[in-house]
Image: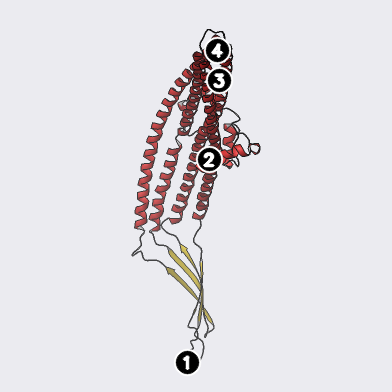
């Protein structure tokens, strides 16, 4: 994975003209249904289950048998005693084998479709997280670019005051150090952006790494509202566990039905070579269940049913607990977001006042540097708060069976 991310990130720098920015989250989610490897795989698995369901309806093929007996044998008069028999046999399934097989295969199709829906819901969650991470990295890069611009402006002002003899040389050195640190943070942010875009591209199966994020998902954080109880659906994990439990129960019936012996009927004609005569032949073949009564397979199917019951109980507990946790995370992220918005607004105002005071000779440079650092930190916290709100919303959407955020 690391090597893939490195190659994709390198593609951003080598051939940016051949790549494009990522579309909106909703559009990317729609398009990914045909390109994302895990979604394509889940669709193929449903096709496998449907194919096996078609095969489950098929009856046993008839058997045509041609037999020749007494080849080269003659009676005392010299006539050939060779007998040629042509017969057709058909196996008849008893014990409800075919119907049990059909019901079990239909349940397997239902389980495969439930798993496909869960894969889609999980993918929408992962896509929201990856998209938000890429957008956050992009906004963080812009944030540090703005911070570097302010640092350079502070450095210019400090040098001007030093040259005018109004500040000591130490102030210019401090401003230069702050500018260098801001530049280093910008370079690290750009590297993080390349990795985040590479991860997003790999997730959706894009042929080339995205160059950026076209629309905002984080800006929707303030407008998100927790869904009401009437909008919450059952957790996909529970639906999958229920479908797999139904399939496991029907597999027990299949294995029990296999213990009943089948009957093979045959009918045909026998040609007597020496007498030039033909006779009708018929037969019945029934296996004797002396050794194999399929008891081991029945026991295994019963054990699989018990395991399916345990998975269903676990899925229900996990879903109930997960929803409560997600709801509390949404409440906490809402409070964090409100505080971050106020903090960022206050930091911007404080920096503007510090710059005005410094330019007017009423505030020292250290106050400007501290205010600039405070505004960058406040903007970063706001970015983190928006990302946390999106993650909480995505987690609740996944637990509630909703595909995507706000869908």
Q: Quote the CA–CA distance across marks 2 and 1.
A: 90 Å
Say how many tags the image has: 4
Mark 3 or 1: in front is 3
Quadrant (top left/top right/bottom left/bottom right) for the C terminus = top right
Regarding residue 222, the answer to whether it shows in the image is no
Q: Which one is nearer the viewer's eye here, 356 or 342?
A: 356
Q: Earlier in the sequence, mark 2 or mark 1?
A: 2
Tell me the tag on residue 355: 4
Q: Secondary structure at mark 4?
A: helix
Name the spot of residue 67 as percent of width and height, x first: 50, 76
Q: Earlier in the sequence, mark 1 or mark 4?
A: 1
Q: Would you say the residues marked 3 and 1 are in contact, meaning their CB atoms lie under 8 Å apart?
A: no
Where does label 3 land, which residue? 151
Name the spot of residue 386 as percent of width and height, x first: 50, 24
Where does label 1 land, which residue? 76
Q: Secondary structure at mark 2?
A: helix
Mark 1 or 4: in front is 4
Q: Would you say the residues marked 4 and 2 are in contact, meaning their CB atoms lie under 8 Å apart?
A: no
Q: Residue at x 45, y 23 (%)?
A: 333
Instruction: Find residue 146 and report its image quarter.
Output: top right
Mark 2 or 1: in front is 2
Q: Quote the CA–CA distance across marks 4 and 2.
A: 42 Å
């Amino acid at each position: 994975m690391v090597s893939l991310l490195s190659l994709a990130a390198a593609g951003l720098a080598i051939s940016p003209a051949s790549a494009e920015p990522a579309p909106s989250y909703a559009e990317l989610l729609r398009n990914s249904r045909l390109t994302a490897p895990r979604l394509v795989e889940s669709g193929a698995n449903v096709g496998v289950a449907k194919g096996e369901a078609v095969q489950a309806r098929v009856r046993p093929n008839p058997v045509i048998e041609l037999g020749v007996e007494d080849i080269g044998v003659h009676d005392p008069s010299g006539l050939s005693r060779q007998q040629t028999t042509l017969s057709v046999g058909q196996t008849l399934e008893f014990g409800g084998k075919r119907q049990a097989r059909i019901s079990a295969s239909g349940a397997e199709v239902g389980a495969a479709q439930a798993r496909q829906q869960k894969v889609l819901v999980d993918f929408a969650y992962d896509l929201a997280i990856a998209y938000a991470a890429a957008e956050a990295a992009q906004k963080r890069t812009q944030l540090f670019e703005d911070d570097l611009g302010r640092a350079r402006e502070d450095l210019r002002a400090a040098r001007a005051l030093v040259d005018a003899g109004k500040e000591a040389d130490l102030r210019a050195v401090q401003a230069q150090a702050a500018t260098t640190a801001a530049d280093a943070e910008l370079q690290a942010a750009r590297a993080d952006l390349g990795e985040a875009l590479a991860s997003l591209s790999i997730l959706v199966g894009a042929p080339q790494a995205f160059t950026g994020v076209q629309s905002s998902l984080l800006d929707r954080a303030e407008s998100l509202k927790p869904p009401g109880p009437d909008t919450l659906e059952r957790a996909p994990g529970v639906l999958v566990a229920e479908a797999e439990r139904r399939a496991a129960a029907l597999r027990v019936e299949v294995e029990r039905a296999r213990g009943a012996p089948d009957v093979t009927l045959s009918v045909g004609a026998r040609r007597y070579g020496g007498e030039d005569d033909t006779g009708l032949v018929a037969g019945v073949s029934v296996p004797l269940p002396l050794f194999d009564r399929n008891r081991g397979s029945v026991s295994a199917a019963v054990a699989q049913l018990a395991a399916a019951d345990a998975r269903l109980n676990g899925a229900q507990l996990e879903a109930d607990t997960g929803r409560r946790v997600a709801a509390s995370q949404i409440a906490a992220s809402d409070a964090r977001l409100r505080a971050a918005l106020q903090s960022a607004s206050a930091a911007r105002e404080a920096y503007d006042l510090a710059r005005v005071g410094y330019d007017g000779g009423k505030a020292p440079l250290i106050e400007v540097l501290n205010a600039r650092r405070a505004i960058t930190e406040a903007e970063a916290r706001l970015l983190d708060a928006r990302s946390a709100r999106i993650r909480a919303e995505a987690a609740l959407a996944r637990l509630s069976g909703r595909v995507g955020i706000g869908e």
